[in-house]
Image (tube, rainbow, N blue to C red):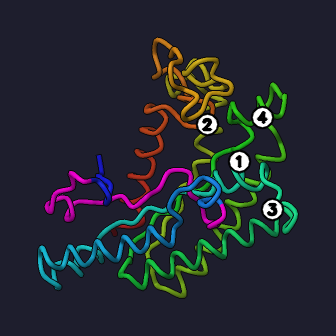
Amino acid sequence: MIPAFLDPKLKKEDLLTGISFASSASGYDNLTAQLTNVLPVSKQLDYLRHYKIHLREFVGARKAEETVKNAVFVLSMGTNDFIQNYFIEPNRSKEFTVEQYIDYLTICMAEDIKDMHNEGATRLVVVGLPPLGCMPLVRTVSGSTRCVGSFNSAAFLMNSKIQDKLAALRSSLRMKIGYEDIYSLFERARKFPKEYGFTETSKGCVGSGEIELGDTCKGQTTCKDPSKYMFWDSVHPTEKMYKIISDDVTRLVKRHILI
């Protein structure tokens, strides 16, 4: 497991093999991080700069620069911008239409990538959004037994605009940037569950599988075999589904990033 930069048990040797600056429930929109009291991307990038200082002190400037240059950066967010911000809180929905908000998010994403590039990043994988409307929580709150079209449409449009923005950044920054299409991956697993070893794709493994999330999972019972489920709680995938995603990312990196 890649250790967190803020982990008090972090060892100097860990600096050479991968560090996580991620903050759960953050987003491209700084307001999303404020709403959930987590670290915005700007702060995560500050910690990247601190990491580079520690790395230089440990292995020297030249080795540190090579390490960052050869590293594969992964940017994965956007879900919380919608399910914990735009579709829940009134601020952004009053300020933007869905498409305008997506344009705003992709502009924020592009600025984040430019900052990463300025810090030495040359290889990047950007993970798209899953079909938000198929998350158990969204279906429950919406009172629907099927995937919610408006949420899926937002995710699909967001992914399309992410890819357009990445195409422009590849050219202007001359970075190797891969796009991970998890929307299609989730859709395939949902439509053909047996191919992936799943027997349940509409509910989570924890509690009722329809509403539990985060702290509300405490004290709940869990299913007997999580590997048969696509979702762990009402939003997050199981370890099995994450493994499917990470394997796909690995193939993407080998095909397009490490060449």
Per the image, the residue denoted by label 2 is 235
User: Cα distance, mark 4 to mark 2?
Assistant: 13 Å
x, y (%) of residue 245?
Answer: 47, 44
Q: Considering the numbered disc 2 on the image, is that residue within a helix, a strand or a loop? A: loop
Sequence-first disc among 2 and 3 = 3
Q: Nearer the viewer, mark 4 or mark 3?
A: 3
Per the image, the residue denoted by label 4 is 147
Sequence-first disc among 4 and 3 = 3
User: Cα distance, mark 4 to mark 3?
Assistant: 25 Å
**Location of residue 258 (image quadrant):** bottom left
Give the extent of the magenta segment.
Answer: 8-31
Q: Amino acid at mark 3?
A: Asn
Mark 4 and mark 2 residues within 8 Å of each other at the beta carbon = no
Q: Considering the numbered disc 1 on the image, is that residue within a helix, a strand or a loop? A: helix
Mark 4 and mark 3 residues within 8 Å of each other at the beta carbon = no
Per the image, the residue denoted by label 1 is 83
Q: Nearer the viewer, mark 4 or mark 1?
A: 1
Which residue is depicted at the point 78% across and 47% down?
151
Per the image, the residue denoted by label 3 is 91
Q: Horizontal placement of 224 versus 189: left or right? A: left
Which disc, if any, is residue 240?
Answer: none
